[in-house]
Image: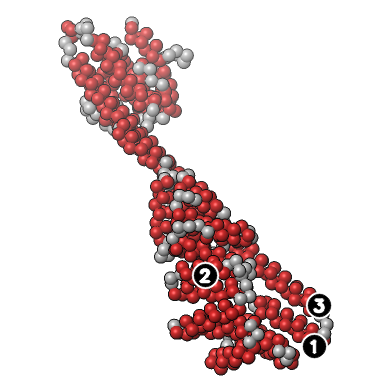
Amino acid sequence: MKSKLLIVITLLAGIISCSRPQSYHRDIIAAADRLFAVDTDSALSLLDKIDPSELTEDSLRAHYHYLRAWGHLRQNRSLIADSLITFAHDYYRGKDIVRDMRSGTVLAFYKFWVGDTHGAVSLLDSITGLDNVPDSLMTQALRIRVLLGASEYQGEEIIPLARRLVALETDSLKNMEARYMLCDAYLNAEKMDSALYIIEDLIDYSGKHQWGEKHFMLSVERCQILTELGRYAESEKLIDYIFTHAGPDNGAADILHLMRAINALNTGNIPLATGELAIADSFALKFRGKDETYYRSYSNLLKTMIDFKQSGRMKLSHVNGQNNRQRERFNRMQASQWESERGALRQESRALALKAESEHKTVIILVTGIAALISLAVAAWIIIIRRQRERDNEERIEALQKMVDEYKSVPVSHIDSPNLPALRRAMIQQLGIIKMVAETPTEQNREMLRKISSIEGETSGELVNWKNVFELIDNLYSDFYTKLHDRYGHTLSLKEEQIIVLMVAGFSTKEISVITGQTTSTIYVRKSSIRKKLGVPEKEDIVIFLRAGMAH
């Protein structure tokens, strides 16, 4: 019994203390880390299984927030919700060169996302200035530094960084992208010859490797650089070449006609500039539809300049219109960024809500499981107690029956033996069992009494063996039943005799009704009948009356 209880308690303790251990989180994070190299989406999905509030160890918290932010960066997703990358970077600083560099790079990009571009650039400058850093780590930081510098139209500052990036990139496609970034840095620094040299080299490279789309876009860039250098004839020749090979309505037709308008404007051919600008506008409307704001920022500026060339006056309305369009574009971009950030926060909130719902269901399941186990434990305990009581009762009944049998076998000459008091107590206990069932008349108790009473013979469907009960009454109460039956047996019925002997033994009306199988109302009726038959006065006790009568 004790062993069963111990098992139940152990199970309950296991369920109650089933909060996920730190080793579980450590395994999930380690698996996600290994998966990042091949499948970033799956790695982030693994991390979504973790509730960050459950991470109590600093090492796990740092690793978790580092991986999440690094995954968002690799996927070009918003980092607006990755503020704890600061904690990860502080944790890894000076401890792990790989995570130190990567977390610092991600932190810089996070600063850029929240509008602190100056802070992002400063952090990246400190990172790219470190010595003895593996090339694979330095290229990541350099690439983002150059990109952020380009977004701020930096030229001279990022040229040496872009050169380092070109030198470090070993992958052919990434090296090509790095050289293009270097070209953009030269353009911002107004070093057009260097920019032209790089762009021509990239055109040759893309042509050899048959990168058609890249070759086309690089050729368009070359037209722009030639125009910037004032080599208008070369620019026009290249534009004609592109139209000949790519068709008059190619994807960059609006930009090419815009450059023709610039060439014409710079050479003083205002009518040609006006015509080319009108063609560019029509292509822009065709290609870009509603998303033509970027193109319009150039087109409207040229129209303002053409108007000035034709009238000799600068109209403030044109300048205001241009400025308003730029501001509108900026507002739309900012609104788009805010919406992106809100979307990221909504997505994170949704994920947290789903996780909370899942945890709520888990708690319900756990509580239900605990309640079921407790119910099973209580049921098992009750069954064990009942079985123990049944065994105890059976053993007691057997002992009592043995004592009664011994008592019956005692010769009359030994009736005053010292063992008589012990036998008398045993019979009183046997009668007490009958009274116990009468007090608590459950089906189980009734069945137990039938079983006990049938030891000495048939009970004929009664709860007790009445012959045995009458013998107990005779032995305990000086042959009361024998005297009652001899004197009133011809007057009283068997049921009435049963009621009288139970009354002598101290049974209540309700208990008598249980043992005799009659209702309490019937017992009251029979008591009234007994009074009439025996002439017992209404206010006198039946048992006292009978004992007094039998004594004479």
* Mark 3 or 2, closer to the camera: 2
Q: Quadrant of residue 292?
A: bottom right
- Within 10 Å of disc 3 (Cα), the crowding (few <14, some 14-19, many 20+) is few
Q: Which residue is mark 3?
A: 317
In the displayed structure, does residue 274 sit left or right of residue 184? right
Amino acid type, callout 2: Arg
SS state under label 3: helix
Q: Which residue is mark 2?
A: 163
Q: Residue at x 50, y 80 (%)?
A: 202
Amino acid type, callout 1: Gln
Q: Residue at x 41, y 50 (%)?
A: 26
In-front residue for pair 44/269: 269
- Within 10 Å of disc 1 (Cα), the crowding (few <14, some 14-19, many 20+) is few
* Mark 1 or 3, closer to the camera: 1
Residue 79 percent across, percent down from the top left: 56, 60
Q: Which residue is mark 1?
A: 310
Q: Residue at x 52, y 70 (%)?
A: 163
- Within 10 Å of disc 2 (Cα), the crowding (few <14, some 14-19, many 20+) is some
- What is the C-alpha distance between the residues marked 3 and 2? 44 Å
Residue 72 percent across, percent down from the top left: 51, 62
Q: Is residue 304 above or below residue 533?
A: below
